[in-house]
């Protein structure tokens, strides 16, 4: 609680009767309400803005150099794990892009480590410079058709509900469960009726959508067309325009953001990898592109800040105004959202700030509990219906997959790949020490001529997924992955040619984000060397096992027909 | 807490898989986000909307007759006491105007009865059909220059903070106290930092305004010009456009409400008497007039509903959408806001609903603790500076007063009125049993040729205020007022010619609002019979003792120079 003495100091400093703690001098401040730009100082006491539209004295001065000042951006839905770095490195990487608040769902780590993973994120969130808030993962595991590392029930979530960094219940992906009245799902919804409940309802419409929203679910980041988004807006949902590394909805949804809707629209990244952050940016990139597409400038900035804050009940932020948290981005240019400096909770964001954070010990360093494999592990027994061997077909840039049938040759080592038709092997290996499941099949679209690619990132249960041309290289890639404690590996003709260790739960690196970004370049090159024709080889491998995305996927329990929502017989 | 069974029923009914509890059939629903109007049913379960944009079956059907459906209106700041009726009668009077939520500040009754008055309002709020929420009175008494019935400190407020009907801290009128760091005021602000704090800062601007807002104060209903309102908006305050019986700001502020600002603007009445409600309406009247002045229609309705809800953190209401409270107004016409029917928390508003409320016993029935007076009570001793006797000059329709000086004749009964110059006597009599203070002086502008008018409504301490031509009629009016337990009286040449009893704390009638409204007509006529030239005689008497309104006022402690903020020497 704020003390009387401090509140009095805030009032007096705002009134100009004593110096503020920090004054940002000489900025051109954008009013996200009216759209006007005004030259002013911004006075701050103890992280709270106390004065605008005036010139102030302060103990510490930050020269604004006539830059544009806008409220710090709020990423309204993301999985930090997808950045492949720790929350601390995410903080250091993304805060300089103006993102002062991130509402994350630790869904990936929770699928591996359960509540220990959630606790690690909460511990980290208490020490990051940006304000990381946590929505509690609502669907772990995502489906009953796969083996995750943990199962999270309502009582597990309730233990965290009153944590100061917890916001509410994270994306309710299990919309079939909501509509069917699944008791575990309903119990979680009941427990968070008085708080925030985040949605996730791709393509849901009409009365089914009404039923879903009637459960108290208030947001959606899965709309992929303007028509879908408009129906959700009409029905009271806030729309979080997503622009991730895989799912890119900004082009399709840009048209929905205008003067009428800006109070009900916010931005998010969901899953964004460090290469994209380095090359394109983060929410700054979304803002830039929305403005370039003709969306009204101050409404774009409003959606990125104050609308997001209000949608999620964060009443203390989102405006550059007295009484608000001093989260501010200083821009060289408004239209192109060129972030020059960032103020987070009243502090100028510099290297020293990050260095001073008290470290949080890594968790889940022994999460790779799979046993070593041999080439024989990957023998695919002959299909009784040889002419109809199902093959998972992937397309560049899509996490959707398609079912094809292939006629494959059979040898004494079972069914063989068919390189002439780009058909290679795929296997998913349970790695949480639960049952040792191994599923094997075929996929096409990777373009591999040699070798194998393995990943311990495998949405959402994060078992090991490996694709490859030879059983030997598949075994090599997997065994090295297990030695690394998780990550990505590339094997080529008996040699591991590239590797990125992700030892934190098999999902995140312990390295600085710059090194991870650099290594990802090397990794890609190694995959391209094998003949891979997909621009994002590792992301595509990581989504092969996600049984909630159509049409044909493979979990550790076998080939899964998403359309029928059951295993392939 | 909602049960799993009920939530499941809401989801299923929304999805159209079982009948809803209530379905409003065939309405033209206004989307306050996009402005579109669509023909639909509205399905409701247990007071929550579960389905829109579709046709539904229900156990109870309300025929919408193709009327327009809009979200119920939210009065964001008012003193129910100013309606002169109980909260129950206010409910019955105002809910049919479409006002489904009222955020009240029981400041008047709190000045008479202290926390007992607040508790009476909270008890009533738990039983009204409309949702009455209470902001806790922050400034009782309003100033130290008057004798109120009670003094409320931070600990008194904290006892109520977690009551389900309590929203936050009510209008912080004592802005000089905020800026001066008054410890009692600061303590109240500190106690409500995590909740809502309502503002009241007439004419405050520049850095002083910054200091006030830095205290965490988020709204203002005292802006009287567009320039003033725009500065407050720029500094992050929400503007509550007020249209009361005395203070009427809608004409001046209409221009600020547009597509840019509607998320930050709401409506309120502050003080509105039952005559105005009967003759012009309530928030429906404000909506009608804003639209008539060319404000964009759906943004006006948005300000009156969802924007208000968001500004005050009422996340469960303000849209006609699944998951929201079923507070709906059905209109015959959108442009003129002709309210035909109202649905409150899923129930059609009809007489039986009000009749079924479990009564709340009246409180403060013995609040008139003043001793009877005699004509000699009103003798004004000769002013040593006879040529400069200060006189409070009133103007029709203004609560502002002006100081004039008069030369008055002196007899053996002290200084005398001067009817040729419209100068009559005024007295304020402490009535809370605290000290028996009586202050006497002169006023002009009433036009009285005979008799006297007395009132126990006397903002904000609610002592007895009496104005009159003869000492005898003043004594008669006051003594009858004491017998009535408070109210308004008119005496004419030795006879009480009209009276309205307000026995509940000397502020509110126990009669139905229709009778109060009728009696007010009779009261006014009786005042006009005395020669009164003010259209609102009783309201003007009731504001003679309010020492925070410029320029010259009189409390029970004497004549008060508001500009110097001290008593007249």
Image: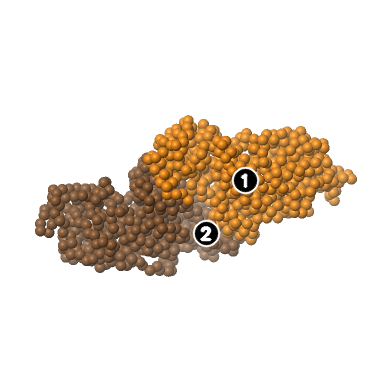
Chain colours: A orange, B brown
Could you tell whether B330 is left or right of B85 in the image? right
Q: Residue furthest top?
A: A65
What is the C-alpha distance between the residues marked 1 and 2?
Answer: 44 Å
| Element carrying mark 2 | strand
Q: Residue furthest left?
A: B412
Q: Can residue B211 be seen from the camera position used here?
A: yes
Give how far across and how far down residue A520 sits, in percent: 69, 36
Q: Give the quadrant of residue B448.
A: bottom left
The residue to which callout 2 is attached is B48
| Chain under callout 1 | A
Front-most of residues A496 and B18? A496
Front-most of residues B295 and B245? B245
Residue lying at 13% horizontally and 57% vertically, measured from the top left: B414
Q: Is residue B475 above or below residue B309?
A: below
Residue lying at 41% horizontally and 51% vertically, measured from the top left: B189
Give how far across and how far down residue B41 sits, in percent: 52, 57
Q: Can residue A252 be seen from the camera position used here?
A: no
Give how far across and how far down residue A237 sits, in percent: 55, 50
Q: Give neighbour class at mark 2: few <14, some 14-19, many 20+ (Cα, 10 Å).
A: many
- Label 1–label 2 contact, CB within 8 A: no
Q: Give neighbour class at mark 1: few <14, some 14-19, many 20+ (Cα, 10 Å).
A: some
Front-most of residues B281 and A153? A153
Residue A360: which disc? 1
Q: Give the quadrant of residue B11.
A: bottom right
| Chain under callout 2 | B
Give how far across and how far down residue A515 sits, in percent: 67, 35
Of badges 1 and 2, nearer the viewer stands 1
| Element carrying mark 1 | loop
Residue lying at 48% horizontally and 33% vertically, measured from the top left: A64
Residues tagged by mark 1 and mark 2 found on one chain of the structure = no
Residue lying at 43% horizontally and 42% vertically, measured from the top left: A50
């Amino acid at each position: 609680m704020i003390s009387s003495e401090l509140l009095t100091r805030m009032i007096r400093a705002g009134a100009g009767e004593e110096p503020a703690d920090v004054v940002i001098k000489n900025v051109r401040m954008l009013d996200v309400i009216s759209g006007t730009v005004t030259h002013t100082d911004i006075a701050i006491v103890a992280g709270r803005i106390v004065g605008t539209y005036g010139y102030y004295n302060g103990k510490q001065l930050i020269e604004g150099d006539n830059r544009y000042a806008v409220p710090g951006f709020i990423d309204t839905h993301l999985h930090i794990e997808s950045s492949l770095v720790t929350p601390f490195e995410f903080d250091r990487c993304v805060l300089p892009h103006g993102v002062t608040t991130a509402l994350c769902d630790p869904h990936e780590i929770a699928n591996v480590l359960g509540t220990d993973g959630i606790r690690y994120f909460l511990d980290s969130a208490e020490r990051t410079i940006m304000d990381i808030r946590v929505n509690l993962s609502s669907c772990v595991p995502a489906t009953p058709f796969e083996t995750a590392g943990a199962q999270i029930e309502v009582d597990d979530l309730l233990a965290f509900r009153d944590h100061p960094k917890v916001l509410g219940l994270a994306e309710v992906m299990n919309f079939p469960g909501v509509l069917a009245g699944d008791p575990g799902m309903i119990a979680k919804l009941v427990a968070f009726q008085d708080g925030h409940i985040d949605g996730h309802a791709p393509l849901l419409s009409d009365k089914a959508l009404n039923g879903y929203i009637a459960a108290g679910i208030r947001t959606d980041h899965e709309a992929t067309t303007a028509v879908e988004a408009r129906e959700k807006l009409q029905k009271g949902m806030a729309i979080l325009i997503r622009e991730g590394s895989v799912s890119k909805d900004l082009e399709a949804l840009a048209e929905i953001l205008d003067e009428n809707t800006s109070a009900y629209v916010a931005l998010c990244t969901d899953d964004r990898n460090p290469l994209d952050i380095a090359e394109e940016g983060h929410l700054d990139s979304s803002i830039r592109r929305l403005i370039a597409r003709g969306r009204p400038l101050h409404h774009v900035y409003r959606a990125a800040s104050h609308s997001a804050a209000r949608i999620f009940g964060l009443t203390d932020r989102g405006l550059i105004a007295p009484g608000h948290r001093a989260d501010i981005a200083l821009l060289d240019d408004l239209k192109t959202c060129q972030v020059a400096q960032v103020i987070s909770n009243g502090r100028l964001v510099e290297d020293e700030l990050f260095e001073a954070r008290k470290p949080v010990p890594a968790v889940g360093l022994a999460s790779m509990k799979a046993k070593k494999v041999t080439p024989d592990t990957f023998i695919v027994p002959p299909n009784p219906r040889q002419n109809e061997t199902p093959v998972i077909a992937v397309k560049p840039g899509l996490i959707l997959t398609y079912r094809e049938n292939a006629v494959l040759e059979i040898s004494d080592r079972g069914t063989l790949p068919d390189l002439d038709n780009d058909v290679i092997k795929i296997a998913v290996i349970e790695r949480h020490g639960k049952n040792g499941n191994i599923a094997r099949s075929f996929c096409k679209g990777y373009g591999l001529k040699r070798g194998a690619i393995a990943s311990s990132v495998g949405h959402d249960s994060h078992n090991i997924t490996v694709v490859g041309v030879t059983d030997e290289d598949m075994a090599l890639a997997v065994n090295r992955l297990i030695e690394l404690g998780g990550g990505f590996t590339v094997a080529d003709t008996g040699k591991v040619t590239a590797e990125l260790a992700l030892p934190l739960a098999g999902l995140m690196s312990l390295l600085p984000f710059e090194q991870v970004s650099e290594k990802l370049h090397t990794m890609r090159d190694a995959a391209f060397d094998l003949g891979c024709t997909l621009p994002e080889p590792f992301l595509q491998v990581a989504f092969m096992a996600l049984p909630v995305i159509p049409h044909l996927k493979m979990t550790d329990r076998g080939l899964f027909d998403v359309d029928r929502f059951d295993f392939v017989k």
